[in-house]
Image (tube, rainbow, N blue to C red):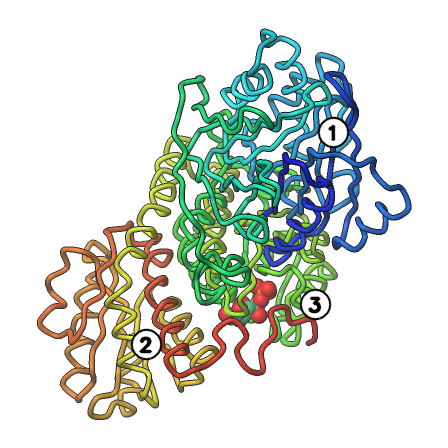
Amino acid sequence: MCGIVGYVGPQDALDVVLEGLRRLEYRGYDSAGVAVRVGNGASGELASAKKAGKLANLEKVLADQPLPSSTIGIGHTRWATHGGPTDRNAHPHLSADGRVAVIHNGIIENFAALRTECEKRGIEFSSETDTEVVAHLLAAAYDEAPAGVDRFAEAMRAVCRRLEGAFTLVATHADEPDTVVAARRNSPLVVGVGETADGTPEYFLGSDVAAFIAHTREARELGQDQVVEIDRARGLTVTDFSGAPAEPKAYTVDWDAAAAEKGGYDWFMLKEIAEQPRAVADTLLGRLGEHGELVLDEVRLSDQELRDIDKVFVVACGTAYHAGLIAKYAIEHWTRIPVEVEVASEFRYRDPVLDRSTLVVVISQSGETMDTLMALRHAKDQKARVLAICNANGSTIPRESDAVLYTHAGPEVAVASTKGFTTQVVACYLVGLFLAQVRGLKYEDEVAAIVEDLRALPDKVAEVLEQMEPVRALGRSLADANTILFLGRHVAFPVALEGALKLKELAYIHAEGFAAGELKHGPIALIDQGTPVIVVVPSPRSRESVHGKVVSNIQEVRARGARTIVIAEEGDEDVVPYADHVIRVPRTPTLLAPVVTTVPLQVLACEIADTRGYDVDQPRNLAKSVTVE
Ligand code: F6R
């Protein structure tokens, strides 16, 4: 997500901050900005500059209107969440009196209520962001805090106690010549501790160590719900939000700059696989309103228009299409509205039956896929309503849609989609529940119960990720395979398709996903002695003995010589006699299981491709954003 840099020390802060932002560019962003504190003595001023687009745009602004030199500065690259990627919405955000500048990574869930409160005090907002409330609240809290050495930190603690959601915040104040304060909850923040050649101490803040690795390798990791005050003379002081002292974890970074960008992982894809617990949690942040109603990001449709919907199409490409196949199970089950799922490149050419009461759900990580965009435009031409599930805020697809749910997964750099997929699946569940609720088919408490199950998913994904070593070893043993087949039933069928797609695109191995029941109608002939067959087994609690039927399918392929690799829930002993390898996943409600069962398949594909010596992040012939039809 957003990149954050802060600096207190003897060097020119603007130079250090801009260099840090450059090193964070890999995170992806759509605007950038900086602020420095200038002036001698206690009463100074803040100077800032910000601009939509790449860092070069900001640097041009700074070349035309240079900021005064300073030794305290903060800088930000923004990945838009609340509010489009514009100059106004770029960070830093200043308080109404111009005395506080704030940068932020994350989502403040209760910003709407806080904004109303500020507006009642007469404050006029100059952006659409959730972040700006923090600047105003911090300025007020600073004025109210008792004068003293840690006044600024006390103000930050008071504000943080009022915030809900995920945030890393870094702030500077015009009246604080030597101090920057920062805070974190659920979003990352690291402090770099260094010294210049003449032994003067200097301090850095970064959303990751890439921000300061050129200056120091000595880092301090902040814990959850902590505030750090960095003071030129007193150094670091860390407390929790109530003011109790806390000890940050000290460590030495042994990565070079390239490894730091990838968070120490060999590939961006591995980093993005590991980010899934956080990404899924972010998709779910702030989705339940005050009265238990589900909240999308943008809805330009009336409740009546939503109630009139009698047919849903889900349209997407590749991995996003697989998320759409899962959406069908959830939406039909929860709303009883018929759902058709279609690849975007086919949709408009077969003249689908669409009208005002049709909802077309388009799913796109990038928001720019041409096939999906053209399908969207066709749907709109036919007067259908369009709801977009998208990751890139400000992209074309959400702009042209009637309603939008952003996945908030943060930028995906690797070409193969991983966290993009799992967050799309979670977003599909939210859309299903949203429609059920609007149509009066689910009470608030029923929705809340399912949202609780959804909120348990990040921990379950984290649990799966902790057990991936044997899966990697298995991946290495499969690297010479010519063909690998994937089987699943019910929601595990799209997971099988996704597993096969990941393997094809990364490892260039022939792979196919099948509905397990279809095997006997032809594909079983492909099975030869030793053919690896990966079976995604539904929960033993799934309806109509789907589980039992898949166990039979495992026996059928094994009897024909297959090497069976089985993904099954903890405690599912029925699969053991027929599995050459079992990959365990935690117990998860049947409909939600794909978020968990897909993860080992991602790891497997990545490991096989790596073992075969291929570039995992940039597979041959593929592009991250496919902007041609
Ligand atoms: C596969 C993959 C692609 C994309 C597809 C749609 O790993 O990444 O199949 O899912 O090109 O892209 P978006 O979601 O950006 O529309």
Q: Which callout, 3 or 2, points to the residue nearer the camera?
A: 2
Q: Residues within 10 Å of mark 1 (few under 14, many from 20)?
A: many
Residue type marked 1: Arg
Tell whether circle 1 marks a residue whose Cβ is less than 8 angstroms from ligand 1. Answer: no
Residue 359 visible in the displayed image: no
Q: Position of residue 308 (x, y in %)?
A: 59, 45
Q: CA distance from mark 1 to mark 3?
A: 48 Å
Residue that mark 2 sits on: 486
Up/down of 536 relative to 208, above or below: below
Which mark is on residue 244?
Answer: none
Residue lying at the far front in this picture: please name it. Answer: 198
Question: In what element is the residue under mark 1?
Answer: strand
Q: Are marks 3 and 2 in contact (CB under 8 Å)?
A: no
Q: Which mark is residue 374?
A: 3
Residue matched to label 1: 37
N-term-proximal mark, 1 vs 3: 1
- The amino acid at mark 2 is Phe
- Badge 2 marks a residue whose secondary structure is strand
Q: Nearer the viewer, residue 282 or 153?
A: 153
Q: Indicate which disc, 2 or 1, sits on the residue closer to the N terminus.
A: 1
Indicate which label's residue lies in the foreground, 2 or 1.
Answer: 1
**In which quadrant of the rendered image does the C terminus lie?**
bottom right
Who's the residue at 66% across and 50% down the image? Answer: 21
Which of the 4 quarters of the picture holds residue 397?
Answer: bottom right
How many marks can you see? 3
Amino acid type at circle 3 is Met
Which class describes the residues within 10 Å of circle 3: few (<14), some (14-19), or many (20+)? some
Q: Position of residue 268 (x, y in %)?
A: 50, 64
For the residues labelled 1 and 3, say whether their Cβ atoms are less than 8 Å apart.
Answer: no
